[in-house]
Image (cartoon, helix red, strand yellow):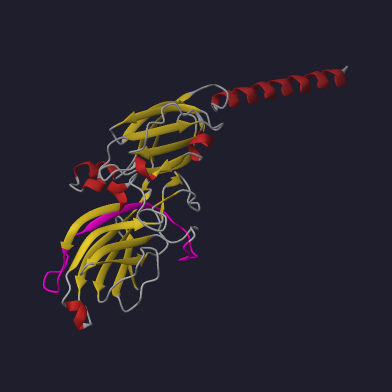
Amino acid sequence: MIKNFLNLLFSVIAFVSLLDGCQKEVADGTVSGERVSLKVSVPGVETRLVSGFDDELANNYQIFLFNEDGVIEDYVNQDSPSVEFDCTVGQKTIVALVNAPDYSDLMDSNVLFQTVSSLTDNSPTSFIMSGYSVIELRSNEKRNVSINVTRKVAKVELSGLEVDMDIPQYREKTFKVSSVYLINVSAETPYFETVAPTLWYNKLGYASEDANELIYDDMGGLEITPESPYTAKNTFYCYANNTEKDTFDTTWSPRRTRLVVEAMLGDQTYYYPVTLPVIAQNKIYKVFLTITRPGSESPDSVIDKFSIGCSVSIRDWEQGGTVTEEI
């Protein structure tokens, strides 16, 4: 009898413990559907709206909230850098896109992370920026989360050009710049990783008008003399090009991006290509050129080291140290 009573008592205790465990699981919010407040902001970007620099503008913000299965839980497209979501607890992936095309119909995080951005989706007053964060929302928790975003483009500047011919016969000839442009430019890139370019603009030379406002400037035959160097700035924007091994083969294959000055020396057209370092997003590459002799006969070619003097400086777009490479 006592043995039967003890067995019954242990069964009751075990059943009560089981109920207690279920109650804790519900209170923890993992199966209750409990909702919590989540405030998301994109710090620092709003200052670009009033910065006065065209390529600093932030025109719209898309903020995506995905659940742990990668399914969209909430989404906004607005001109404000912050939003407050009322959402369920659990793991969340938060994605922020600034100045990007409308993705309001996108319902899956895997699709978004595989989406490719086109260079022509950018403009001098609207450059795409992206960032994301993965967090865990718990019961009875109110969270503030900042999503840092960075530009997908890099900036390339011709910051100065002077003419100092070292052979008398060339000093007597006029030097007029026809155009300045980038060649071998990556035309697209994923939003959240850097991969080897597969689509290109201006392969081997100026060929495309698709991205002219970003990678081409018509100089209209601007004459430059030793007494009047070119001090205005040509600014170009391109996607990352991580091609390490360069080539000057006349048959197209992936290669480094180049800044090209196309000019007339007397009545002859010459090209002055500057091979840029590996291009990374959100960097600024400043080029200063001194023209000393006739250039090359094609834009994608090795130029005689006696024809130009060149320096290239590299820095982070916002801030950071500067590295100078002499070419």
Residue 293 vs residue 216, the one in the foreground:
293
Q: Position of residue 28 (x, y in %)?
A: 55, 28
Tell me: 314 left or right of 218. Answer: right
The residue lying at 33 percent from left, 46 percent from top is 211
- Can residue 232 be seen in this snapshot? no
Residue 211 vs residue 295, the one in the foreground:
295
Tell me: 201 left or right of 55. Answer: right
Q: Which residues are magenta?
A: 223-250
Task: Locate the N terminus and report the quarter of the image it occupies.
Answer: top right
Res. 133 image quadrant: top left
Residue farthest along the left direction in this orientation: 227
Task: Locate the C terminus and report the quarter of the image it occupies.
Answer: bottom left
Q: Position of residue 39 (x, y in %)?
A: 37, 33
Res. 293 image quadrant: bottom left
Number of marks in the rendered image: 0
Residue 18 vs residue 194, the one in the foreground:
194
- Can residue 75 be seen in this snapshot? yes
The residue lying at 39 percent from left, 38 percent from top is 96
In this rendering, the answer to whether 126 lies above or below 104 is below
Q: Position of residue 10 (x, y in %)?
A: 77, 23
Q: Position of residue 86 (x, y in %)?
A: 41, 25
Is 207 a magenta residue?
no
In this rendering, the answer to whether 89 lies above or below 115 is above
The residue lying at 26 percent from left, 62 percent from top is 158
Question: Principal SS element in the magenta part?
Answer: loop
Is 228 a magenta residue?
yes
In this rendering, the answer to whether 131 lies above or below 216 is above
The residue lying at 36 percent from left, 50 percent from top is 153
